[in-house]
Each structure stands twice: as structure tokens, then as C-alpha cells.
Image (cartoon, grey):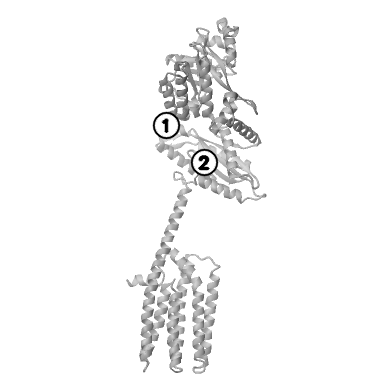
């Protein structure tokens, strides 16, 4: 008990936040205390002037006033100084000790004056003691240790003095009255200080929790890196603080390659381990050179001071580091990373614009420079402007009037007749003119317009299918966005059911890349289409990374061999592989279609190898539906039979 009391008196166990608040409040109340003491001292000296020695009525109160002025100046100066915890505790202890010394000086001086003068002067001394004690208690209320010690060192000597002075019964009563009032005020003070301390500590705890919540709200829990919100907040702050002559600033977006395949193969626990390790590698590589954040999924971003050349040099090494194997449960897993970088000089542009540029550069890396960084350039800027114009035109396009389809025939190698047509999209904008599908389809995918586009093209394909012979199939391409959009698949199913076209005549074509982007979603979508009676074909077979087991897991009916196996510089060297693919299709009971047939020699080889159908410029180029009747009745349709 005694030890706890001593710790409390010496401020050894005071809380940091409470000590700061005590110090803050004392800075505004200590000057008032010294002002009160000075006024009371001058008044008491004045009433005893002439009845007490000059050194007691003039020089002592003058010295006490000077001490008070000096301490007031010292506390006023403290307002302009930031203190740490150690300094604050030292100030509070110093204030407590100095308060005891000054209170002893005041009570000793006032009791000395009691020996001079008559009843009026002695009454003034009693009044001085009472007022001074009350004033000290209230002014020192933020520091109850000092208030209690000052009250005890003031009232106790005065009470003892009155008890020992003969014939001072009235003043003994006054002294007892002062002691009682002092005890009551001190009790009230302690109650108030207890509530004060609880309030300070509760606010401190609330502030601490708020800071923790803020940290959690701005931190990615898996990697410990700043999250998307924190990244853009910091980026906006850095851009807003830039001037015209500021150093260049580089922003990059990093996306992992092949991470989804690893996540699906080994599970989400292993995937999380990989992401955590990626975050650790990025933090280590950019330490002291930039800040990195996780935006979500397998996408990260960074900000660094420097131009594009410095950022490219740094991220080339970072991409190599991220491509090194990751160990999970004694399994070495290899993924990669692609990066897009954008830079600014001066105070322009906005953070969103800068991020969009970096993201566009990342898209270029993923398409043509996988595993490497790409710096946003003027070429990209022109492409962005072009894509924005295309996007704006697509948003307001009258699809019924502007959209059209062309058909490319597919011939059967046994009957030499037309077995299918592939539907190819064509768009002619009133403002932009003809736009290639290779340009407007990716724009439609990135901007969310592809659903409306796919459904309209399919309706046009169904309308054309109704005019073709029953034996002719209609091949329609689906993208990865289509496969992962339940709304699109349901719209296609609804349109097919309402068209009256036999579902078996419709062949939905998808690439290996589209199939692997989200294998689970692809399996569900293709299962729904296959259950309806439609066929499914893998397009551009041999250019992706699909496992052969997928040919059994998915409802695949035919395989379209990529043109690189049929035509081009390396086609002859790949003929053995081409023959193996055709043989595999036979063993799996899959129809085999060869794309890119351009010469009679190629057509003859494919027929000999046992390919089921042919497609290419030798057979026919894509044509409007109106021209298909002429082709079917013309000599080019009999080219295959003649070559045989």
C-alpha cells in the first residue's frame, strides 16, 4: 500500500497519455496560480506595512512575486516546445517539488507576520491562508499529487501554530474550519480527477483503436502491404504536392503470370502462400527505392521517384526475381510477372490517369512481352486515344444498322461439300468507318460492352443459319468474357431456343486460353450449351497450354488446328506433329478441322492424313451472307473435288 502511494506521489506509474494531458492543462493554469499568489502576497504585505519589519512586508513578498513571474514565464515558454514522455514526467515532478518549497515559503512568511499587528492583521493572515490553499488546490487540480502536498504543507503548520499560540481560540476554530474545507475540496478534487483520468484513458484507448482500424483499413492482411485504398491515397498526395520542377515520378502495375493455374492446381492455401512471398519479395526489392502495395488478387502496384529508364531497369530485375520458384509443401512452383510503367514530370496528371496508363502498358506486356516490364509511350497514348474513340462509338452504336457478319466456308474432305460456316463479326461505324474485330472486340471486352455485342452477333448468326441447308453447321466464337458471364450464356441459350434452329447445327468455338482463364466457369457454361444439344470446338488448337485431359473433362466435339501447323515458314517442319494431332483426334472420336489452308499441296496432305474438314483462303475468304449462295453454286466450291 505504501509502495503504491509512493509510486503515485512520484508519478512513477502515470500513463503516458494522462501525463501529456496533465501537462497540457497545467500550462494554462499555473500562470493563474502565480498571479493569485502574487496578488495575495502583495495584499498581505501591504496590510502589514509599518507594523512589521520592512524586509517582511516588502522584500519577502517582492522576492516571492519575482519567483512567481519567473515560473510563469517558464511555463509560457513551454507552450512552444514539444516534449516527450520523459521530459513531461520530469516537468511534473519538478512542479510538485517546487510547489512544496514555495508553499513552505509562503506559510512560513505568513505565520511570521502573525506576530505583528493586531486582530485585523491576524484575521488577514487567516484569510490569506484559506484563500491561498483553495486557489492552489483548484489551480493544481490537473496534478493532484502537488495539490495534496501543497494543501498539507500549508494547512498543517497553520493549525499547529494556532494551537500553540496562547489566547487564539477563535483562530484555532478558523484553522480547523480551513482544514475541514480543505479535506472536502481535496475529496472533490480526487473524484473529479478520477473522472478526468478515466476520460483521458478512454479517449486514448478510442484513439488507439481508431489508429488500429485505420491501419487495418489501409493494409492488406495477407501480405502486410498497403492496400488499394492506401495506394491511391498516397499517390494522390504525392502528385498534389508536386511542382513544375519536381523530379519524375514512376507508377507501375504488376500482374502475376500463371498464378491462377497454380492456385487452381494446388489450392487457395498454397496460392495465399505464394502471394505472401510475392509481397515479401517486392517489399525487399523496392526497399529504399519506392513503395509497393497490393491492389487485389494477384495485382500489385508501386510508386518510385525516377524516370522511365530507372523504373524499367529496376522492374526488369524485379520481374526476374518474381519468376524464381516458390516453395510450398516441398513443391517448387514457378510463375512469372508482367509489369506496366507510366511516368510523369511536373504536376500533371491525376492519379487515376497515371494508373490507367500503367495498366494499359501492363496489358501490352501481358499480350506481347509477358514476363517483362513495358513503359507507357506515345505509341500507347495514340492507341488509347483510338480505343477511347472506338469505345465512345460502340457505346452509342446502332448495332442493327452498323453490325454485320461475314461467313467463311468449311468444306468436308470426304464429300467435298460445304459442311459449316464460321461467323465473323464486322463493324462499320458512321464516324470511324470499318473497324477490325481484332480492335473493337478487345475494347468491348475491357469496357463491358461485349455482352450486348455477343448476343446481337449470335442472333444474326441464327438468322443466317435458318437460311442455310440443314446439313451446314454454324460456328460461333466465344471469348473468355463470354464463358465467365452467366448472363451472356443464358442469353445465348434463350436466343437459340427461340430461333427454331436445331441446336446440333450450332458449334461454339473457344480458344485454349479462354478455356483456361476460369476452367470451372468454362466447364459450367459449356456443360449448359452441350446439354442443350449444341457442339463445342477448341479453336487455334496447339497454341495454348491446355492439358489433353481437358479434352475428356469438357464436352468437346471437334478440334480446329491452328493455321501455324498448316501454313507459314514452319509448317513443313511441323507436318509430323500435325499428323499426330489428327491421329489423336481420331482416337478420341473428335472431328478435326484444319485452318489456314492456302495451297493445293496443303489440302492434299491434310486429306491424306485423314483431316475431317478444311478452312482457309484456298477454299474461300470470309464473305457477306449474300455472296455465299453464289460461292456454293460457283466453281470455287468445287475446288476441293477438282483437286481430288
Name the residue rendered at 38%, 85% in the picture: 175
Q: Is residue 205 visible?
A: yes
List x then y, in percent, for residue 310. Answer: 61, 42
Q: Along the line of sight, which residue is nearer the eye, 616 or 263?
A: 616
| Vertical comparison of 203 with 256: above or below | below
Which residue position holds label 1? 265
| Vertical comparison of 416 with 543: above or below | above
Disc 1 crowd rating (10 Å Cα; few below 14, some 14-19, many 20+) is few
Q: Along the line of sight, which residue is nearer the eye, 105 or 86?
A: 105
| Residue that protrudes farthest toward the right in the picture | 245
Provide the secondary structure element on which disc 1 rests. helix
Query: For the residues marked 2 and 1, what is the alpha-carbon distance in whole angstroms?
Result: 22 Å
List x then y, in percent, for residue 295. Answer: 50, 42
Provide the secondary structure element on which disc 2 rests. strand
Disc 2 crowd rating (10 Å Cα; few below 14, some 14-19, many 20+) is many
Which residue position holds label 2? 300
Q: Along the line of sight, which residue is nearer the eye, 496 or 260?
A: 496
| Residue that protrudes farthest toward the left in the picture | 1
Q: Earlier in the sequence, mark 2 or mark 1?
A: 1
Relative to 433, is 35 on the left or the right?
Answer: left
List x then y, in percent, for residue 512. Answer: 49, 25
Quarter where residue 182 is shown: bottom left
Q: Is residue 598 visible?
A: no
Amino acid at each position: 500500500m505504501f509502495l503504491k502511494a509512493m509510486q503515485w506521489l512520484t508519478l512513477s506509474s502515470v500513463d503516458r497519455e494522462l501525463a501529456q494531458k496533465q501537462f497540457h492543462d497545467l500550462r494554462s493554469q499555473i500562470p493563474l496560480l502565480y498571479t493569485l499568489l502574487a496578488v495575495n502576497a502583495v495584499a498581505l504585505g501591504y496590510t502589514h506595512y509599518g507594523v512589521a519589519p520592512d524586509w517582511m512586508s516588502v522584500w519577502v513578498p517582492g522576492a516571492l512575486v519575482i519567483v512567481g513571474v519567473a515560473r510563469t514565464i517558464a511555463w509560457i515558454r513551454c507552450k512552444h516546445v514539444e516534449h516527450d514522455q520523459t521530459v513531461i514526467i520530469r516537468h511534473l515532478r519538478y512542479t510538485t517539488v517546487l510547489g512544496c518549497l514555495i508553499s513552505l515559503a509562503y506559510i512560513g512568511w505568513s505565520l511570521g507576520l502573525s506576530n505583528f499587528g493586531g486582530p485585523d492583521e491576524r484575521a488577514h493572515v487567516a484569510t490569506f491562508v484559506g484563500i491561498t490553499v483553495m486557489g492552489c488546490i483548484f489551480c493544481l487540480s490537473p496534478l493532484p499529487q502537488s495539490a495534496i502536498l501543497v494543501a498539507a504543507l500549508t494547512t498543517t503548520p497553520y493549525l499547529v501554530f494556532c494551537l500553540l499560540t496562547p489566547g487564539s481560540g477563535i483562530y484555532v476554530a478558523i484553522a480547523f474550519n480551513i482544514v475541514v474545507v480543505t479535506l472536502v475540496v481535496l475529496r472533490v478534487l480526487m473524484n473529479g480527477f478520477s473522472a478526468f483520468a478515466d476520460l483521458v484513458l478512454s479517449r486514448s484507448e478510442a484513439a488507439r483503436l481508431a489508429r488500429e482500424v485505420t491501419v487495418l483499413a489501409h493494409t492488406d492482411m495477407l501480405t502486410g502491404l498497403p492496400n488499394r485504398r492506401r495506394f491511391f491515397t498516397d499517390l494522390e498526395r504525392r502528385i498534389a504536392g508536386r511542382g513544375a520542377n519536381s523530379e519524375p515520378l514512376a507508377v507501375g502495375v504488376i500482374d502475376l503470370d500463371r498464378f491462377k493455374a497454380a492456385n487452381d492446381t494446388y489450392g487457395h492455401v498454397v496460392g495465399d502462400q505464394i502471394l505472401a512471398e510475392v509481397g515479401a519479395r517486392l517489399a525487399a526489392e523496392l526497399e529504399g527505392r519506392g513503395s509497393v502495395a497490393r491492389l487485389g488478387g494477384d495485382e500489385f502496384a508501386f510508386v518510385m521517384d525516377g524516370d522511365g529508364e530507372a523504373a524499367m531497369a529496376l522492374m526488369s530485375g524485379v520481374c526476374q526475381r518474381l519468376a524464381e520458384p516458390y516453395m510450398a509443401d516441398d513443391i517448387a512452383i514457378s510463375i512469372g510477372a508482367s509489369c506496366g510503367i507510366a511516368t510523369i514530370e511536373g504536376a500533371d496528371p491525376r492519379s487515376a490517369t497515371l494508373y490507367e496508363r500503367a495498366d494499359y502498358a501492363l496489358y501490352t506486356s501481358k499480350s506481347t512481352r509477358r514476363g517483362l516490364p513495358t513503359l507507357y509511350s506515345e505509341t500507347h497514348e495514340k492507341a488509347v486515344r483510338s480505343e477511347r474513340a472506338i469505345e465512345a462509338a460502340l457505346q452509342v452504336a446502332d448495332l442493327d444498322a452498323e453490325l454485320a457478319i461475314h461467313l467463311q466456308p468449311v468444306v468436308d474432305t470426304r464429300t467435298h461439300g460445304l459442311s459449316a460456316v464460321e461467323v465473323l463479326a464486322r463493324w462499320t461505324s458512321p464516324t470511324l468507318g470499318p473497324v477490325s474485330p481484332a480492335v473493337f472486340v478487345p475494347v468491348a471486352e475491357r469496357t463491358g460492352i461485349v455482352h450486348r455485342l455477343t448476343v446481337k452477333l449470335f442472333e444474326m448468326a441464327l438468322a443466317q443459319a435458318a437460311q442455310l441447308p440443314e446439313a451446314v453447321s454454324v460456328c460461333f466464337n466465344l471469348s473468355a468474357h463470354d464463358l465467365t458471364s452467366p448472363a451472356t450464356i443464358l442469353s445465348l441459350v434463350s436466343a437459340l431456343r427461340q430461333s427454331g434452329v436445331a441446336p446440333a447445327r450450332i458449334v461454339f468455338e473457344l480458344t485454349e486460353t479462354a478455356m483456361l482463364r476460369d476452367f470451372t466457369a468454362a466447364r459450367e457454361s459449356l456443360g449448359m450449351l452441350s446439354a442443350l444439344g449444341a457442339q463445342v470446338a477448341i479453336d487455334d488448337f496447339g497454341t495454348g497450354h491446355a492439358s489433353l485431359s481437358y479434352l475428356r473433362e469438357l464436352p468437346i466435339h471437334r478440334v480446329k488446328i491452328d493455321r501455324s501447323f498448316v501454313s507459314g515458314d514452319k509448317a513443313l517442319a511441323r507436318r509430323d506433329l500435325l499428323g499426330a494431332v489428327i491421329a489423336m483426334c481420331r482416337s478420341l472420336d473428335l472431328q478435326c478441322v484444319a485452318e489456314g489452308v492456302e495451297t493445293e499441296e496443303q489440302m492434299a496432305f491434310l486429306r491424306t492424313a485423314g483431316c475431317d474438314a478444311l478452312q482457309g483462303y484456298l477454299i474461300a475468304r470470309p464473305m457477306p451472307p449474300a455472296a455465299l449462295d453464289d460461292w456454293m453454286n460457283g466453281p470455287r466450291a468445287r475446288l476441293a473435288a477438282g483437286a481430288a
